[in-house]
Image (cartoon, grey):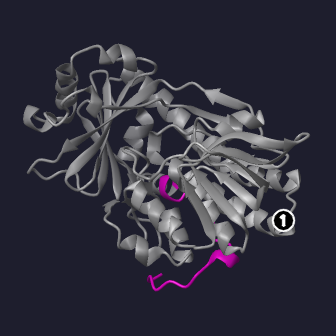
């Protein structure tokens, strides 16, 4: 049976970043990704300032800067006829006073190619965990030819997202939080008129809500629907949806004609929760596998990467020794629990203050706390710091750092 020090299930941002960092620590690591490539529509494409700084520390800042990208410096919100800036990233210290919008596939390709010591196996899906008594000792996976393999590992890390197979197989219990919405995601071509450059723009009116991000030649648009009503609403005419979206965003019919059918509307089943315990003997979950995030604020990718950095920093030494005590896995959870809980509490507050009232038709004006933010630039910059840098940002461990020519 093949054996490695660490097997990572899931080749998303958390899994590939963790694989890169452990490989730089000289650890034999394999990342298993069930898809054949990184190309997915409507994945998290926001890369936050704390992650941009991390890329500089890893010596990848210049390569990242060469990728096609947009820069977001503000988040704007309009409720009915009141419009405000809710977050301003322009006041952040350092070279990254913005959020970068980069296709996740490009970002993951950059990370995957940064360290030849990481073995990334595409088209390989974890189907179950291997055990010796109560201890997890590796995984069983199916490759793209349908062949089944066993892979022994001193540590298995679940980075396989909201519907994590590793979490389920390990018997780790998720505490779920209620969410009022699911999301329809669409691409809408840009018109000739100037848009809100460098901004995320959120609009709420008449029981509807949508957020747009400027992606160059189109707007990536997230339209909120009441939780669990996707199938029911899709029984309606797509023209009715185009009309509603056009009225909300002030877009004409010609532009919205790009949404030809329901096949152009991607459904995101929103889930938010947190594991009571992120680990068991021989196995750890991080990122969305440990704490599925609401898409509110677009922070899921950033939190997943921060988890990966903390895990690599705390676990590299015991992995080199070939044995990872559960106390070390508990240390990862302790380090990352506070920032995770703080962000989720903020998301739940936004849901209660804005999203639920909007979707049930009772939101008539900006809530008082947001009106205060709208007229206080200092609060806008503070919100930008919380959203862009956050609680307890992680730095690259010394063993993973490489020189960079990016100005600091």
Residue shown at 77% from the left, 40% from the top: 277
| Image coordinates for residue 178, horizontal then vertical, percent | 57, 24
As displayed, is residue 357 above or below residue 382? above
Q: Is residue 392 visible?
A: no
> Magenta stretch containing residue 407, yes or no?
yes
Q: Main secondary structure of the magenta part?
A: loop
Q: How many C-alpha atoms fall within 10 Å of the one at disc 1: few (<14), some, or many (≥20)? A: few
* Foreground residue among 340 and 262: 262
Q: Secondary structure at mark 1?
A: helix
Q: Which residue is mark 1?
A: 318
| Position in image of residue 271 (x %, y %) | 54, 31
- Residue at 69%, 77% (x, y): give it: 399
Q: Does residue 180 appear in the picture of this structure?
A: yes
Residue displayed at 65% across by 55% down: 307
Where 151 falls versus 407 (above or below)? above
Residue 135: image x %, image y %? Answer: 87, 44
Query: What span is colored magenta in the figure?
Result: 386-408
Q: Residue at x 36, y 23 (%)?
A: 363
Residue 353 shown left or right of residue 171 in the figure: left
Horizontal side of 142 relative to 223 (left or right) equals: right
Residue 110 highlighted magenta (yes or no):
no
- The quarter holding residue 174 reads top right
Depicted 221 relative to depicted 21: above or below:
above
Most foreground residue, 370 or 261: 261
């Amino acid at each position: 049976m093949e054996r490695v020090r660490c097997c990572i299930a899931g080749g998303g941002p958390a899994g590939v970043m963790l694989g890169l960092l452990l490989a730089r620590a000289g650890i034999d690591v394999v990342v298993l990704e069930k898809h054949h490539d990184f190309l997915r529509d409507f994945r998290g494409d926001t890369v936050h300032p704390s992650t941009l700084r991390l890329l500089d520390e890893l010596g990848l800042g210049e390569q990242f800067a060469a990728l096609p990208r947009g820069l977001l410096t503000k988040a704007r919100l309009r409720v009915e006829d009141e419009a405000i800036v809710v977050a301003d990233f322009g006041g952040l210290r350092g070279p990254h006073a913005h959020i970068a919008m980069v296709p996740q596939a490009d970002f993951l390709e950059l990370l995957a190619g940064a360290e030849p010591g990481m073995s990334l196996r595409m088209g390989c899906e974890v189907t179950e965990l291997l055990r010796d008594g109560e201890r997890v000792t590796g995984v069983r996976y199916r490759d793209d030819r349908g062949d089944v393999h066993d892979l022994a590992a001193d540590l298995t890390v679940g980075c396989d997202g909201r519907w994590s197979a590793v979490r389920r197989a390990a018997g780790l219990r998720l505490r779920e939080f209620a969410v009022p919405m699911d999301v329809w995601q669409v691409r809408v071509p840009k018109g000739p008129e100037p848009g809100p450059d460098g901004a995320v723009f959120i609009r709420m009116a008449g029981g509807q809500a949508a957020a747009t991000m400027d992606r160059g030649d189109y707007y990536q648009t997230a339209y909120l629907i009441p939780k669990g009503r996707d199938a029911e609403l899709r029984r309606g005419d797509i023209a009715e949806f185009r009309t509603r979206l056009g009225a909300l965003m002030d877009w004409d019919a010609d532009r919205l004609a790009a949404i030809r059918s329901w096949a152009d509307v991607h459904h995101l089943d929103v889930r938010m929760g947190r594991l009571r315990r992120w680990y068991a003997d021989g196995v750890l979950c991080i990122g969305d596998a440990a704490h599925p995030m609401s898409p509110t604020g677009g922070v899921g990718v950033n939190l997943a990467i921060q988890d990966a950095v903390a895990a690599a920093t705390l676990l590299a030494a015991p992995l080199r020794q070939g044995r990872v005590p559960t106390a070390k896995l508990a240390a990862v959870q302790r380090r990352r629990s506070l920032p995770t809980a703080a962000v989720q509490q903020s998301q739940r507050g936004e849901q209660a203050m804005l999203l639920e009232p909007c979707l049930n038709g009772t939101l008539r004006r900006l809530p008082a706390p947001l009106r205060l933010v709208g007229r206080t630039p200092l609060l806008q910059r503070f919100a930008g710091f919380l959203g862009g840098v956050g609680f307890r940002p992680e730095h690259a461990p010394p063993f993973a750092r490489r020189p960079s020519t990016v100005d600091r």
